[in-house]
């Protein structure tokens, strides 16, 4: 059976009473009367349009009178007008410094779009409490903070330091790395290692790097399950820090390279994440696309709505080798620079970051730039100039999101670090818009179905029109979020108001560049959707008469340009 599509380009004249306060609309002879449809592109000979993901049946209007928007976004929209809202999204890792309800609320107020929990640390009970608090925050205070669960992965790491938050290793000190399980307290200068084959795999003379070189040791002796090492680069050891070992200047990848990407503990964590209904699951040390595909079908079989997005963490040599297939298979990616920098020379990390960010945009997948963005703010209230430059570069690359790790998990200034990310993002985005500095990026077609290709063309055109006409906002009505992501991919100059019927879609859209997600029940009748949206937004002072808006929808594939009546 063939599906018929045709597109309508509708130009709405402002109603006679409305006085446009914005840039003038096109000359009147280009305007078409309300309700008149202009056949714009016809994909088949069938007469009518409507590509609906709901079989043409209007969505149920559960609460027709309401519109849900983030309390902070609402305040920002009112304060600065919508052209200046922040486009870059912010992810905060939640740890001991930020797990309380008030602390989480402070992060949400500070602009946290996604809360990340790292299953390397803490117990499932601890993480469940964090999830419950974020839920309560969303419910009680109107936020739409999404939850991302990050798996531990099966790379080699140290144990938890017997409860200490950090331990100093000094130059020349002898430390023992052991696979033995120590029941009570750890003997002095002893580190537990999680990988059974560790003592067999390392050799005397190997270099042992903690967290990619934050601290270094040299292997001097192997005694049964114990490996004695001398500290050659002093520094702070953090609980469960990652370990890599190097021989003759290159990374040793022997048995650990055979470990599965998703360990048995990870599968249990994933079950926990599914049961808790997290919004994103980030997979550590992804090596190939298969693991992502496998996990996605696992989730689909277990979660009724299967609406958990899978984020591939790019942090290993293998993930760089198979980058395109991995990103293609995943719902998004993370440039996990911490471990990546332990696997490739540090000077190659910036170009890898740029490549991953660009590829994600081309393939229409959200991308997060993570690790050490503001590392010094774990201890100090102001960032270094170099850190600000690094954050600026990620914003300039137009990554979807920036992530705080230790800065928010265990640092002394989580709120200040978030403020720095927020203000740097706003400043660079504005500078970039004012100077029109962005280079045009060729966006290849990503859709597999004809209707998806139509959506792409609509979004590309709508974004271009929005820039050329300098409209105030793009509106997108989307049930699955797909159309919103296509608009976000174009990185238009104006913000994108994304209306969706489902709370979980709204939360997930919170990771994507430039999207302001609203939950709203709507029907397949665009005219009535628009009128209702205008009324609801005007009642909350979020838009005003005369604002110029371009609206697209994934039900009626059309582009409409209009002034708010
Ligand atoms: N739930 C937690 N409980 C205790 N400490 C935590 C928790 N989450 C994070 N941390 C602390 O914050 C630091 C930075 O967090 P982050 O999530 O970046 O982890 P990581 O151990 O560096 O590993 P990964 O490569 O998985 O990101 C950790 O090293 C740890 O000390
Ligand atoms: C975030 C993470 O896993 C890393 O940077 O290694
Ligand atoms: K992790
Ligand atoms: Mg990592």
Image: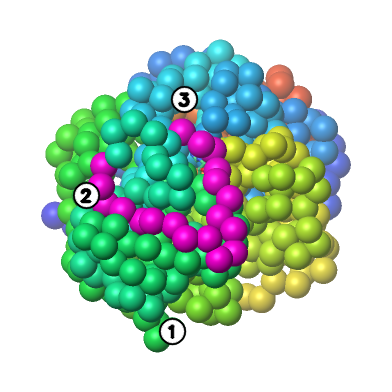
Q: Give the answer, above or below, for where 352 lies relative to 180.
A: below
Viewer-nearest residue: 303 or 474:
303
Q: CA distance from mark 3 to mark 2?
A: 23 Å
Mark 1 crowd level (few <14, some 14–19, many ≥20, 10 Å Cα): few
Q: Mark 2, mark 1: which one is toward the viewer?
A: 1
Element at badge 1? loop
Question: In the picture provided, is 553 more to the left or to the right than 305?
Answer: right
Q: Residue at x 40, y 50 (%)?
A: 191
Residue 396 showing in the rendered view: no
The reply to whether the magenta stretch includes residue 367 is no
Question: In the picture provided, is 547 more to the left or to the right than 317?
Answer: right
Give the quadrant of residue 75: top right
Element at badge 2? loop
Q: How is the image coloured?
A: rainbow
Q: Residue at x 59, y 38 (%)?
A: 410
In the rendered structure, which disc, 3 or 2, sits on the residue that comes first in sequence? 3
Mark carried by residue 249? 1
Q: Residue at x 29, y 33 (%)?
A: 183
Question: In the picture provided, is 56 more to the left or to the right than 250?
Answer: left
Magenta-colored span: 163-181
Residue 446 at x, y = what percent? 37, 66
Q: Is mark 3 within 8 Å of ligand 1?
A: yes
Give the quadrant of residue 365: bottom left
Mark carried by residue 263? 2
The residue indicated by pointer 3 is: 130
Residue 108 at x, y = what percent? 63, 30
């Amino acid at each position: 059976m063939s599906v018929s599509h045709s597109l309508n380009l509708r130009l709405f004249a402002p109603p006679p009473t409305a006085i446009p306060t914005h840039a003038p609309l096109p000359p009147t002879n280009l305007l078409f009367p309300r309700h008149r449809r202009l056949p714009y592109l016809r994909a088949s000979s069938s007469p009518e349009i409507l590509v609906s993901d709901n079989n043409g049946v209007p969505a149920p209007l559960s609460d027709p009178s309401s519109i849900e928007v983030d309390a902070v976004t609402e305040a920002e929209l009112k304060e600065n007008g919508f052209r200046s809202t922040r486009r870059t999204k912010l992810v905060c890792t939640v740890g001991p410094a930020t797990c309380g309800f008030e602390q989480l609320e402070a992060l949400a107020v500070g602009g946290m779009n996604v809360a990340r929990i790292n299953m390397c640390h803490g117990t499932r009970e601890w993480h469940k409490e964090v999830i419950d608090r974020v839920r309560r925050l969303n419910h009680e205070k109107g936020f739409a903070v999404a939850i991302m669960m990050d798996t531990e992965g099966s790379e080699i790491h140290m144990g938890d330091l017997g409860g200490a938050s950090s331990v100093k290793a000094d130059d020349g000190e002898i430390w023992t790395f052991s696979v033995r399980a120590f029941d009570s307290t750890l003997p002095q200068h002893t580190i537990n290692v999680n990988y059974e084959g560790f003592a067999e795999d390392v050799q005397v003379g190997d270099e042992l790097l903690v967290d990619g070189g934050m601290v270094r040791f040299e292997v001097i002796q192997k005694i049964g399950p114990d490996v004695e090492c001398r500290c050659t680069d002093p520094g702070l050891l953090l609980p469960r820090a990652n370990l890599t070992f190097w021989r003759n200047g290159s990374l040793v990848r022997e048995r650990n390279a055979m470990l599965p990407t998703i360990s048995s503990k990870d599968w249990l964590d994933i079950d926990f994440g599914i049961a808790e209904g997290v919004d994103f699951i980030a997979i550590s040390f992804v090596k190939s696309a298969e693991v992502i595909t496998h996990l996605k079908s696992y989730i689909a079989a277990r979660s009724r709505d299967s609406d958990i997005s899978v984020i591939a963490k790019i942090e290993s040599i293998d993930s760089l080798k198979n980058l395109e297939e991995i990103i293609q298979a995943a719902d998004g990616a993370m440039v996990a620079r911490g471990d990546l920098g332990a696997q490739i020379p540090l000077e190659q990390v910036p170009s890898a970051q740029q490549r991953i960010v660009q590829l994600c945009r081309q393939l229409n997948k959200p991308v997060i730039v993570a690790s050490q963005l503001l590392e010094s703010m774990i201890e100090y209230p102001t960032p270094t100039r170099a850190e600000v430059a690094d954050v600026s570069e990620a914003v300039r690359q137009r990554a979807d999101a920036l992530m705080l790790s230790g800065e928010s998990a265990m640092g002394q200034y989580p709120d200040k670090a978030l403020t720095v990310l927020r203000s740097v993002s706003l400043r660079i985005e504005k500078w970039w818009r004012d100077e029109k500095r962005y280079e045009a990026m060729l966006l290849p077609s990503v859709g597999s179905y004809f209707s998806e290709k139509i959506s792409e063309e609509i979004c590309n055109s709508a974004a271009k029109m929005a820039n050329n006409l300098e409209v105030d906002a793009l509106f997108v009505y989307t049930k699955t979020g797909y159309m919103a992501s296509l608009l976000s991919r174009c990185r238009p100059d104006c913000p994108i108001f994304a209306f969706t019927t489902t709370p979980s879609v709204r939360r997930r859209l919170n990771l994507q560049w430039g999207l302001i997600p609203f939950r709203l029940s709507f029907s397949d009748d665009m005219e009535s959707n628009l009128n209702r949206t205008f009324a609801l937004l005007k009642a909350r002072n979020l838009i005003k008469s005369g604002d110029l808006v371009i609206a697209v929808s994934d039900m009626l594939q059309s582009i409409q340009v209009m002034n708010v009546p």
